[in-house]
Image (cartoon, rainbow, N blue to C red):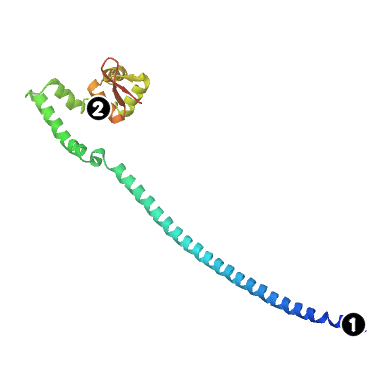
Amino acid sequence: MVRVRQHAAAPAQPIRRRRAANVETLRTVADDFLSGFGRLVDEVVALREAVAQSQAENDQLRGELAEAIDLFRDAGTLVARTGPAAQARGRAATRAKAAPARAAARVRAASTGGGGTARAARASTHGRATPASVTRDVVRAVIGKLGSATASEIAAEISHAGAPVSGRAIRHIARAAGAVMRRGDDGRMVYSLS
């Protein structure tokens, strides 16, 4: 019988230890959970502050963007109101300012016969030797149509269309239009788009 009593009394001690171990484990788990939850709350608060800061920056940038757009619109309005001569800078401005005086001198010379030529008289009435309709885009279009051509061939094509122009003018306009210049098989300069 003694053995039976020992058997019955023996299991009581490990049960107490398990309860004590379970309480410690629960405390450790609860502490870990609370510290993890605290870190999570701190991260949420930091994210909320970052979002609020980003929204404030976005509002500031939107205001700056609206101001910049207004400035561009105002600049566009000013450019539209000013004439093309007022927009010119550098050499172009110098030429634009000097052009009326030169044209007046040509008209005086042609009308008085004081050394003026018929060409000077024509230039003063037209304002320029190359028609305004002959632009870089027109020259590029003709080069594209012909494939590759000399300045005189391009000038002939444009003149045939109704805007008389010289090969010399075409050379200058083609360079400005970005046409590629190379020597042809016959040694003449040929213009192409590539």
Amino acid type, callout 1? Arg
Numbered mark located on residue 3 in the image? 1
* In the foreground, 162 or 15: 15
For the C terminus, which image quadrant?
top left
The answer to whether 16 is drawn above or below residue 117 in the figure is below
Amino acid type, callout 2? His
Q: Is residue 11 visible?
A: yes
Q: Quadrant of residue 40?
A: bottom right
Element assignment for label 2: helix
For the N terminus, which image quadrant?
bottom right
Q: Which residue is mark 2?
A: 172
- Label 2: how many residues lie within 10 Å, few (<14), some (14-19) or many (20+)? few
- Describe residue 80's horizontal placement relative to residue 111 as left or right: right
Q: Residue at x 17, y 34 (%)?
A: 99
- Describe residue 107's horizontal placement relative to residue 56 as left or right: left
The answer to whether 16 is drawn above or below residue 132 in the figure is below
Q: Residue at x 26, y 38 (%)?
A: 84
| Dot 2 or dot 1, earlier in sequence | 1
* In the foreground, 36 or 130: 36
Whole-percent x and y of residue 38? 59, 71
Whole-percent x and y of residue 53? 47, 63
Q: Residue at x 25, y 41 (%)?
A: 87
> How far, Cα to Cα, is label 2 from label 1?
122 Å
* In the foreground, 68 or 110: 68
Q: Quadrant of residue 189?
A: top left
